[in-house]
Image (cartoon, grey):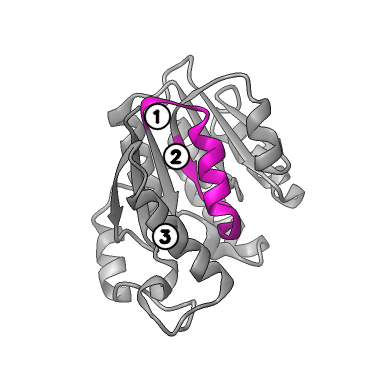
């Protein structure tokens, strides 16, 4: 299956973007610079998913958010801009090359006091965090998705929400002919969540698939 394939028709995607509230100028600039400078600009959350994340924070009103997978900072800005004044988002990424661009736009957005960037291995960093979280967004290495989830769960407050991206993996998870390592890991994760009695969950066909997980206890 072509990994550039749309899960929905491109014209439907464009229509959805046209009927989604506009990005801030800073987010527009960040998207442009990401497309110019990054080898994998498709990793950017983008307008629809960014607005979705902003509205989730506005509705949930979390004070603390943990993000795995910063990339150039688009999703972090979308979430942090809806945090209260005393709110904090910690974002972790293992690629040191993204830090400069992310920090540049955190500053441009005026959110540098609400966002803390940590470069390194999330599985090593998460246990050292001396705090718990009301919300988490996982958009990191899919081959370690289950391990990331278990690590995050140990830091979640009851009633918290975990949002996991790319859970349909270009539609490969429903294709029995697709059995590469990453596809198998995502299938295993989806089945694990379905069987986890600590949570309730819904899988949404938003872009490349978003799993929303509510921590019940």
Q: Position of residue 159 (x, y in %)?
A: 33, 27
The quadrant in which residue 33 appears is: bottom right
Task: Name the image quarter holding the C terminus.
Answer: top left
What label sits on residue 82 in the rendered view? 1
C-alpha span from label 3 to label 1: 25 Å
Secondary structure of the residue carrying tag 1 is loop
Q: Residue 78 carries which label?
A: 2
Residue at 43% across, 49% down: 164
Identify the disc placed on residue 167: 3
Q: Is mark 2 on a helix, strand or loop?
A: helix
Instruction: Label 3, secondary structure: give it.
Output: loop
Residue depicted at 57% across the width and 63% down the height: 41
User: Quarter of the image holding residue 102?
Assistant: top right
Range shown magenta = 136-160
Which comes before the other along the chain, label 2 or label 3? 2
Tell me, yes or no, whether the two marked residues, 2 and 3, touch with CB atoms within 8 Å.
no
């Amino acid at each position: 299956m072509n990994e550039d394939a749309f899960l929905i028709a491109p014209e439907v995607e464009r229509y959805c973007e046209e009927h989604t509230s506009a990005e801030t100028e800073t987010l527009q600039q960040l998207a442009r610079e990401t497309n110019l400078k990054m080898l994998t600009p498709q990793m950017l959350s983008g307008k629809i998913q960014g607005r979705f994340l902003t509205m989730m924070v506005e509705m949930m009103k979390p004070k603390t958010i943990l993000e795995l997978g910063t990339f150039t900072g688009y999703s972090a800005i979308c979430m942090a801009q809806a945090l209260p004044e005393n709110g904090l988002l910690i974002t972790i990424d293992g690629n040191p090359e993204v830090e400069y661009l992310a920090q540049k736009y955190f500053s441009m957005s005026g959110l540098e006091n609400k966002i803390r960037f940590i470069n390194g291995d999330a599985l090593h960093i998460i246990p050292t965090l001396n705090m718990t979280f009301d919300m988490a967004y996982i958009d990191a290495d899919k081959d370690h998705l289950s391990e990331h989830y278990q690590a995050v769960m140990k830091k979640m407050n009851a009633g918290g929400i975990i949002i996991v991206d790319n859970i349909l993996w270009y539609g490969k998870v429903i294709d029995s002919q697709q059995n590469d390592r990453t596809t198998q890991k995502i299938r295993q994760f989806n089945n694990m969540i379905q069987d986890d009695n600590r949570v309730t969950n819904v899988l949404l066909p938003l872009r490349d698939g978003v799993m929303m997980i509510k921590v019940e206890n």
